[in-house]
Image (spheres, helix red, strand yellow):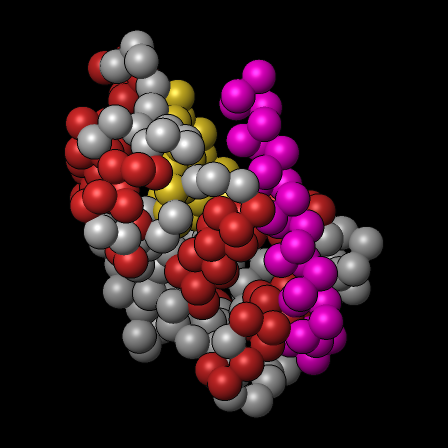
């Protein structure tokens, strides 16, 4: 049940089937010279919609913006503060709770450390405010990396590399603009870098050359399965 496509009566009828909602979080962030800026959003939303075809689930409209630190100097990245991100998550949950939903799963396609921590902190604060809800925060990319381990050839593949290029080749092939060379950033350990693009010029973390649409389709299937397993664990 895709909320943005539903009417008011359809939403009300949906409450008789489920009280669980998936909230996709992404980012507008550089993904090398070959992938779209909204790659993270596309991945998270795609997985949520696929899961909702397999069992009754509400899917909220995606939050396109995230907190992006390591890519903040690259053209096209639009970053919001962790404070704003936390407020967005909390406000969305509060409103959906008033609509009658009680289980809220943030599915983040962006795996930035501060970004994910902000969502987790917001979830903890929501749990302390309401004793009638359940909250989960899952990073879609980390699910893909872990569950797709047998498919992924690139050690340490992380951003705009084999995994994400495969995913977009499968789900949005018309938005893949060629490929890119393998690259790994060289941020100095422990030192905060002002000019982040100097340490990471191409914006790729992995090897896009090993990507394929077939890999992307299989990884997507595995992530959907992992998300559904998470939901079953919450219900139990």
Residue 233 sits in quarter:
top right
Q: Residue at x 63, y 41 (%)?
A: 226
Q: Nearer the viewer, residue 135 or 187?
A: 135
Q: Is residue 63 above or below residue 120?
A: below
Q: Is residue 183 magenta?
A: no
Q: Residue furthest right?
A: 150
Determine if residue 232 is in view. yes
Percent from the top left, x then y, of residue 106? 40, 39
* Residue at the top extreme, as displayed: 131
Query: Horizontal and vertical percent for residue 209?
Result: 69, 79
**Magenta stretch, main secondary structure class:** helix
137 or 225: which is nearer to us? Answer: 225
Figure check: 63 above or below 181: above
Image position of 84 (left or right of 68) = left
The front one of 48 and 167 is: 48
Image location of residue 44, percent across then percent down? 46, 54
Residue found 19% across the figure and 45% down from its top: 8
* Residue nearest the viewer, comparing 199 with 175: 175
- Residue 108 sits above or below residue 89 on the image: below
Look at the picture and state if 23 lies above or below 42: above
Please tell me whether residue 230 belongs to the stretch shown in magenta: yes
Q: Report the span colored magenta.
A: 208-236
Q: Residue at x 31, y 13 (%)?
A: 132
Looking at the rendered image, the quarter that the C terminus falls into is top right
Image location (x, y in percent) of residue 220: 62, 58
Image point 72% across, 71% down: which residue? 214
């Amino acid at each position: 049940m895709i909320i943005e496509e539903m009417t008011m009566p359809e939403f009300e009828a949906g409450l008789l089937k489920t009280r669980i909602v998936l909230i996709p979080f992404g980012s507008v962030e550089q993904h090398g010279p070959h992938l779209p800026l909204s790659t993270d959003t596309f991945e998270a939303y795609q997985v949520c919609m696929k899961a909702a075809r397999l069992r009754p689930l509400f899917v909220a409209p995606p939050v396109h913006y995230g907190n992006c630190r390591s890519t903040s100097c690259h053209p096209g990245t639009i970053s919001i503060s962790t404070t704003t991100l936390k407020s967005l998550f909390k406000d969305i949950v509060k409103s959906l709770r008033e609509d009658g939903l009680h289980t809220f799963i943030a599915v983040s396609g962006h795996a930035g450390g501060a970004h994910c921590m902000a969502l987790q902190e917001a979830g903890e604060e929501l749990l302390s405010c309401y004793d009638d809800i359940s909250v989960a925060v899952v990073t879609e990319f980390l699910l893909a990396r872990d569950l797709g381990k047998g498919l992924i050839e690139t050690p340490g593949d992380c951003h705009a590399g084999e995994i994400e290029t495969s995913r977009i080749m499968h789900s949005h092939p018309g938005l893949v603009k060629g490929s890119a060379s393998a690259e790994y950033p060289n941020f100095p350990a422990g030192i905060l870098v002002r000019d982040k693009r100097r340490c990471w010029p191409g914006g790729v973390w992995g090897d896009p050359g090993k990507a394929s649409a077939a890999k992307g389709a299989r990884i997507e299937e595995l992530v959907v399965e992992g998300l559904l397993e998470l939901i079953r664990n919450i219900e139990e």
